[in-house]
Image (cartoon, grey):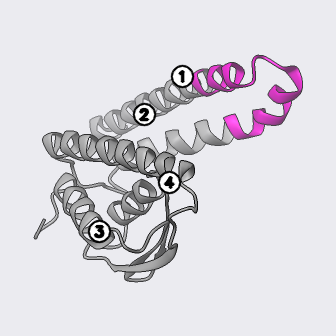
Amino acid sequence: MSTGQQQTTGETLFAAGAFAAALAWRLFVFALLWWLLTSGQQAAALFGAPFVVAAAVLSTLARFSTRAGFAKLSPIAPLALLRLIGFFLWHSLLGGVDVALRAFRQPLPLQPDLIDYPLRLPPGPATVLMSGLVSLMPGTLSVICEDHLRVHVLDRRGQWHEDLERLEQRIGAVYRLAGF
């Protein structure tokens, strides 16, 4: 056996060991989280066990496949990520206050609508993040429809297009996409 083959075998064994260790760690963490979320109820543990295993295996596979170069994600910009988090938290707070104030007004000041927002982000993680963040903000729900985002809003009179544009700009900056 040549030195190159021995080195490859050693690297493979190391990778297998690292994978097993990462999987064991994830199994422990996910099981602990499930146990905490269900207050240690035995019936819930039996129900959640397949999901804990699936989450651990899939997250470990995803982690190791990116290391191997199969599904490389572009590196993110940490400062842009902090700006995005601040933007999201601020707009979530504003949205929560807006929804709460609407709930106490009679009659309810609502003019719900579906808004189609044309996406400039390329398909992939950035678009999924955009849809997820929009849906997490109070009073909105979104779905990706080919080249646009369809957003349900509580009041069509708001500045939804501008807010979505600013969010998209920040997400593009996080992923270091050209033009953002």
Comes first in the chain, label 4 or label 3? 4
Q: Residues within 10 Å of mark 4 (few under 14, many from 20)?
A: some
Could you tell me residue 173's position as x and y percent?
A: 16, 56
Q: Which mark is residue 159?
A: 3
Going from N to C along the chain, the mark reached first, 2 or 3, is: 2
> Is 124 rendered above or below residue 56?
below
Mark 1 / mark 3, whichever is N-terminal? 1
Which is more N-terminal, label 4 or label 1? 1
Q: Which mark is residue 102?
A: 4
Magenta stretch encompasses residue 41: yes
Q: Nearer the viewer, residue 58 or 171?
A: 171
Task: State the residue in front, 110 or 59.
Answer: 110
Determine the CA span between mark 1 and mark 4.
45 Å
**Looking at the image, is mark 4 or mark 2 nearer the viewer?**
4
Callouts 4 and 3 close, C-beta under 8 Å: no
Q: Amino acid at mark 2?
A: Ala
Q: CA distance from mark 1 to mark 3?
A: 45 Å
Q: What's the residue type where badge 3 is placed?
A: Gln
* Figure check: 38 above or below 155: above
Q: Quadrant of residue 6?
A: top left
Amino acid under label 4? Arg
